[in-house]
Image (tube, helix red, strand yellow):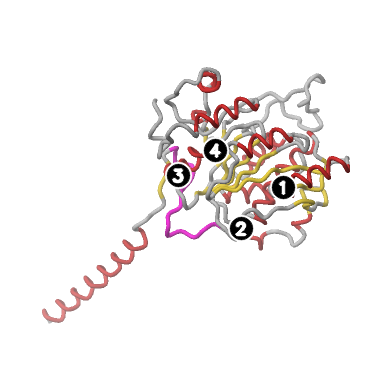
Amino acid sequence: MHERRLWSNLGYAVVAFMTFALLWHLLSTPPVLSPLGDAFTVYTHNSTVFTYPFQLLDPSDYNRLIDISFNFTITNFVCNETSPLLLVLVHTAPTNFAKRRTIRETWGQEVEGVKIVFMVGSVNSPELQKTLEDENRKYGDFVQGSFLDTYRNITYKHVMALKYTIYHCPQAKYILKTDDDVFVNMPAMTNFLKFDLSPYGASRVLFCTPRRHANVLRSYRSKWRVSFQEYPNRTYPTYCPGWSLLYSPDVIFALYCEAQVSEYFWIDDIHITGTLTERINVKHTDIEFLVISFKNLRNIVDFDYNVTEPFLYGRSDLEERQIRGLWRYVTTHSVPKSVLKDLQY
């Protein structure tokens, strides 16, 4: 009897050991919490690359944009079958030729693991359309939609950018939506994604510079005037200015699905990163501290001083000389491997 109990206990011990070993193997590389907080999880090499659940989309979804029929009039498949670390979607007005040239000659130069496209709408001028097509033939970096490119259609452009990401670059690990008057410190950005976050991607990421308790503008003098019929509330929900939005794929998909079934509102920053983000229950992660200060912007561009604080972005509404000055600086100075660890608090 004693011998039988001994063998039984030994069997239990072996089973327990094997179970522990299996659990240890499965959990040996658990998800890592971001140093910026626990709002999202970064992926490890054991995780599956995010792919979009296309089965959840209506079969007619590709040719519909919110409440209008839609098609891509110019499409470049810059990702092909690759899995870029970062896809950059640059909103640009069709006539902003100089701004696009500045980006292509500075931070938009080809970098391994980074793909950049310029998002435009359609134009009424056949001459302008031909010029855009010539530019696209030269550079191969346009995405054009069938809606007219106007202020009132800017939300269409933003949702088109989400659509392009889902259908034509589904393996991008991070997605940056920005504007054509912005500087992106691409050497620091790629290090930030690889070493401060994860080269394998992340979930529930919306990094931006949130604005809270913003009043709805009712004055006829403002180009951003919104009527009570368009938006009845006195203040907007927390939202992010659209010049620096870093998304993860799951947030892209959730926002896109919500946008496709929501009533159109023409200010995309408010609609996409405010109203819809609130609906999908995603929190904004504030990265204002990674935007260059006005003081350091002047120190670099106007005085050629060294600065100690690392940064991911220049500010919005930059002049061409400022973008080129920042680019000269970042390409002649060392880039920290970890942007967060190099911050001087």
Against 236, residue 253 (above or below) is below
Residue 122 location, x and y as percent?
82, 44
Please tell me how crowded label 3 is: few (under 14), some (14-19), or many (20+) other residues with Cα within 10 Å. many
Foreground mark, 4 or 1?
A: 1
The residue positioned 53% from the left and 39% from the top of the image is 186
The span from disc 3 to disc 1 (Cα, nearest Å) is 35 Å
Element type at mark 2: loop
In the rendered structure, find residue 52 and report the number of the disc placed on it: 2
The span from disc 4 to disc 1 (Cα, nearest Å) is 33 Å
User: Which of the two discs, 3 and 1, labels the residue nearer the N terminus?
Assistant: 1
Provide the residue span drawn in magenta.
36-50
**Viewport quadrant of the N terminus:** bottom left
Residue that carries the numbered disc 3 in the rendered image: 197
The span from disc 1 to disc 2 (Cα, nearest Å) is 31 Å
Residue that carries the numbered disc 4 in the rendered image: 207
Foreground mark, 1 or 2?
A: 1
Element type at mark 1: helix
> Visible in this render: residue 32?
yes
The span from disc 2 to disc 3 (Cα, nearest Å) is 21 Å
The residue positioned 51% from the left and 17% from the top of the image is 303
Residue 42 location, x and y as percent?
46, 49
